[in-house]
Amino acid sequence: MSEPRLTESLIQSLGEQLTPVRRLPPPWLRTAGWLLAVAAIATWLLAHYGIAGMLRRWSGTPDLAMAGIGAVITAVCAAWAAFALGVPGRSARWAWLPLPGLLLWVSASGMGCLRQWVAPATHVASLPEANDCLVFIISFSIPLSALLILLLRRACPLRPVLTAVMIGLASAAASAGLLEICHSFDSTATDLMMHALAVAIVVAVNAAMGGRLLQPR
């Protein structure tokens, strides 16, 4: 058998063994799917706690409302960035997408550090109360991070650690937004330090563990 026929036979044999790959939905659509899970959790919390308490806090302290909106924007943009980074050929600049929401979230939350000076009658969160916020954000970030990792494993991102950081940021921001539904006191410096610690832990753990889980197999 001639060399060209051997090559042709080999190519045909390899082609017959190929398994069709289902094309992944676009990043915005997968982001919407993840946000449905977040919305389901929000619906459950609203059914349990109601919306009156959150609206009452927001009307008295509008900066809390802005911080909550910033957290939601950060969650949406970070999740979108994570899915975009999972597409081969996409620029690493997608990681900057959550920055505007993050700046709004951080700057509005920073008003809590001045809360006792602006409003001396503000209830200062005790350590157990602040710890509850830490536990809430971390607890809800675990399933949200796991879902994002599961959705992204099929994509095999070429920048697994950067993608995992976006996963951690999206999950922590979404959890902080959900916390607004049942947050029973105004944010003060003590409370905000716990929020920042919780977000840092979630992002760091995702960068360490999520980066390994997203490594191309």
Image (tube, rainbow, N blue to C red):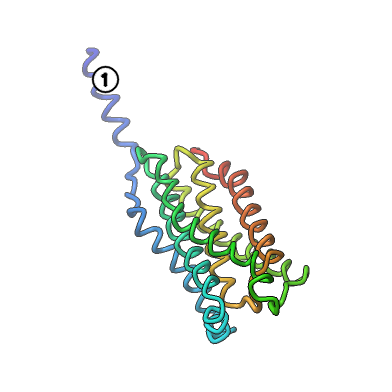
* Residue at x-position 52% and y-position 44%: 214
Quadrant in the picture for the N terminus: top left
The number of callouts visible is 1
Q: Observer-nearest residue: 190 or 217?
A: 190
Percent coordinates x, y for residue 76 in the rendering? 44, 60
Residue at image point 59% right, 65% down: 111
Residue 55 position in % (x across, y down): 52, 82
Residue drawn 56% across the image and 53% down it: 168
Q: Quadrant of residue 107?
A: bottom right
Which residue is situated farthest in the top direction here?
2
Up-down relation of residue 109 to residue 205 (above or below): below
* Residue at which label 1 appears: 7
204 left or right of 80?
Answer: right
The residue positioned farthest toward the right in the image shown: 127
* Up-down relation of residue 152 to residue 50 (above or below): above
Classify 77 as above or below 56: above
Give the left or right position of residue 113, taking residue 164 as reference: right
Q: Nearer the viewer, residue 31 or 114?
A: 114
**Mark 1: amino acid:** Thr
Residue 119's spot in the image, x, y percent? 65, 76
Image point (48%, 48%), residue name: 153
For disc 1, the neighbor class at 10 Å (few under 14, some 14 to 19, many from 20) is few
Asked whether 182 or 90 is in front, the reply is 182
Instruction: Pick whichever, 125 or 148, lies toward us.
Output: 125
Helix, strand or loop at label 1? It is helix
Residue 90 locus on image (x, y percent): 36, 41
